[in-house]
Each structure stands twice: as structure tokens, then as C-alpha cells.
Image (cartoon, helix red, strand yellow):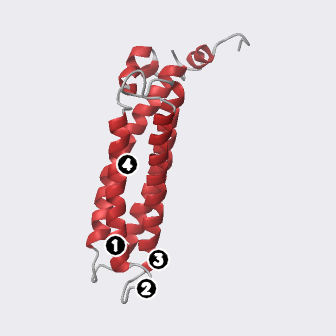
Amino acid sequence: MDATMSLEDILKDAGAHPPALEGKESAQPSCSALTRAAIEGVVIAITAVKTEAEANLALNGPGMPGAGHSASAAQAVSHVQVALDKFTYLLTWLDDNKLFSPKSYVTNISGAYSVYNYVRDAVLYLHLTRHWSAVSAAWNAKRDPHHALKCIDETSTLLEELEELGTKATRCYLSYVYS
């Protein structure tokens, strides 16, 4: 390996250069998906999950007579709150740093990386939200699992959407690296 080779050349020589990133144009459509509306949509969706998790907590949480594994309802709320906090912070940070400018979507490597990074973190906490909601639904199957089951469904849908957003953010980030 020649010390003067670029990272792109090293990756190409190693056969590790992703074909989808061969040209800057191939990844740019991914950047246009990183809009303020997309990030706000995630905040709205996480808030809806949190509403269901809180309703389940009110019915099946600690201190509720007859609730099974009541801590699971509290854990679901705790984890969805972390996911919400992360995306609310991301939106504020992108706005404060004017990273939706001059276009209506994230237009630089820092913003793209941040979206990718926050999606990764939120996905982890949403998986935990779904897990604890499932535990609560199972333990309260004969009691009132409605909100826990709805939380599971909404979280599952949101996770699918976030994986797509995360993929686009990753491609956008890498489009700046490989351009």
C-alpha cells in the first residue's frame, strides 16, 4: 500500500468500495430525504408511541392492583422517552446550526452523520420500548393489554421507517466522504 493513496483508492484496491457510492450522484437523492419534515415526522411518531406506552403504564404499571410485571410498563415509557429526547435534540441542533440550508434538506456531512447517528441510537431505544411493551402485554394478557399491543404495533412501524431513514442518512454521509 502506497502512503500517498487516498482512502477511496485504498478501498477500491481492497475491493471494499461500495458500488452504490461510485458516483456522487448515486447518493445525493438520499440526502434529499433528510428533510425537516422527515425528522419532525419521526418526533410525531415517537410521541404517539409514548402516548400508548404511558396509557399502558397507567393501567398496568407499578402500584396498579392486579398488574403483572408492572415494571415492564415503566421501562417501556423510560426507553421511548430517551428516543424522543434524542430526536427532539437532533431537530433543534439541525435548526440551530442551519443545517437544512440552503435547501430544505440536510446539506453537509456533519448534518448527515448526525441524522445517521441519532437514528442508530433511537432504534436501540425503540427496540427496548417494544421489548418491554411485549413483556407487559404478555403479563397482562387477561387484564388489559390493548395499549401495550398498540405500542408494539406503532413501534414496529416506526422502526421500519427509521431503518429507511438511517440507510438514506448513511448514504448521504458517505456521498460526502466519497465525493
Where's residue 131, x and y in %?
A: 42, 64
Which residue position is annotated with label 4?
43
**Location of residue 59 (image quadrant):** bottom left
Residue lying at 71% horizontally and 10% vertically, measured from the top left: 4
Which label's residue is closer to the chain start, 4 or 1?
4
Residue lying at 36% horizontally and 69% vertically, measured from the top left: 54
Judged from the image, the secondary structure of the residue bearing numbered disc 2 is loop
Which label's residue is closer to the chain start, 4 or 2?
4
Which label's residue is closer to the chain start, 1 or 3?
1
Of the two numbered discs 4 and 1 in the rendering, the one whose residue sits closer to the viewer: 4
In the rendered view, would you say 36 is above or below 59? above
Judged from the image, the secondary structure of the residue bearing numbered disc 1 is helix
Where's residue 162, x and y in %?
A: 38, 44
- Identify residue type, mark 3: Ala
Q: CA distance from mark 2 to mark 1?
A: 13 Å
Where's residue 17, x and y in %?
A: 52, 21
Which residue position is annotated with label 2?
63
Q: Are marks 4 and 1 in contact (CB under 8 Å)?
A: no
Task: Please name whichever residue, 86 or 5, is drawn nearer the observer in this view of the structure.
Answer: 86
Judged from the image, the secondary structure of the residue bearing numbered disc 4 is helix
Where's residue 79, x and y in %?
A: 47, 61
Q: Residues within 10 Å of mark 4 (few under 14, many from 20)?
A: many
